[in-house]
Amino acid sequence: MSNDMHSESFPLSGEKSLNTREKKLATILMEAGVSEVSLTRALVALGEATAEISLHLTNYVRHEFAGSQNASGDHQLELDIQCDKAVFDSVKASGMFTTVASEETPEETNVGNGIYSLGCDPLDGSSIIDANFSVGSIYGIWPGSKLVGRTGREQVAAAVSLYGPRTVMCIAVPGIHKAFEITLVNNRTEWHLSKEKVEIRPSGKIFAPGNLRATNDHSKYKALLEHWMTNRYQLRYSGGMVPDVYHIFSKSKGIFTNVSSASAKAKLRLLYEVAPLGMIVECAGGKAIREDKDESVLDITIDHCDQRLGVCFGGIDEVDIFKQFMFST
């Protein structure tokens, strides 16, 4: 079967034909080893959502609040709502999803009669967008119609999009034991395979220490920070989880931490952020563990949509150093 025949063989819904961007991404996925047409259709839908969000960000001018809060109590930007709508519209059009929950719509929401469910953060980093820093989108795809009660290990794919000078998307599919990167090119009309394999080497002196306020009353985290500085690690921290973790993918090395304390509570949500990114990290050969014990974040049961925790992502050796400092008695 030729690439063109494969990409033409599955309209996203009904008789809708694929646009050039969708065809190109379908071909990339097939060549990467994704054999399931249904999963290809689901990932193509996330590519379409990413392209639409990229357009919204390009046209963003003012930091306008919508006058509403999401269920987590966060004030919503108009941009947050636009990006959330872009994801919901794309996954509904695909016909591949039954349930979606997002940071802006933090409950299991029916979107059709598909075979997958999606947990996502359509706009991660809205607090730093006024400074024109890079921001991102995070996606996790689970089989079936439920998200609560599942683990991250059950994901059939995960993806993260980064919006900066370029719009890129890193896709991980555990079934093919691979993570790879695509880039949106030609005025957003097509995707290009920009990195065939994303890998994280065991060691590398790059660190991104999130929630540093916790060092005020967390002596072990403070000691770890001093270790990084004493050993001349390079600080690469923007305040956005997506760009900071993506930097590890880009450089193939490093460590990202977000540790909580009594005075600085955990902020990262398991469903929307931690589980999908954890899947990509592990598919790239790294480790993704919780802050308080040597357990993969992919093995934690999602008890509710707003479940939060601290984490450590990175190269195997760098995570082992984290464990030596944080889990010592």
Image (spheres, helix red, strand yellow):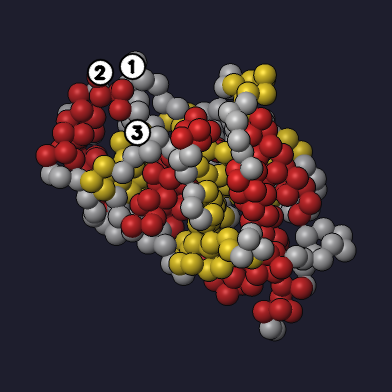
Q: Residue at x 87, y 63 (%)?
A: 15
Q: Is residue 209 left or right of residue 149?
A: left
Disc 1 versus disc 2: distance between alpha carbons?
Answer: 7 Å
| Label of residue 108 in the image | none
Residue 122 in view: no
Q: Residue at x 67, y 20 (%)?
A: 68
User: Residue 115's spot in the image, x, y percent?
Assistant: 72, 52
Task: Name which residue type carries label 2.
Answer: Asp
Label 3, on which residue? 210
Label 2, on which residue? 217
Return the residue found at the far right. 15
Task: Name which residue type carries label 3.
Answer: Gly
Q: Earlier in the sequence, mark 2 or mark 3?
A: 3
Query: Given this view, does label 1 or label 3 mark the residue nearer the observer?
Result: 3
Q: Residue at x 24, y 29 (%)?
A: 221
Task: Name which residue type carries label 1.
Answer: Ala
Return the residue found at the far front. 61
Label 1, on which residue? 262
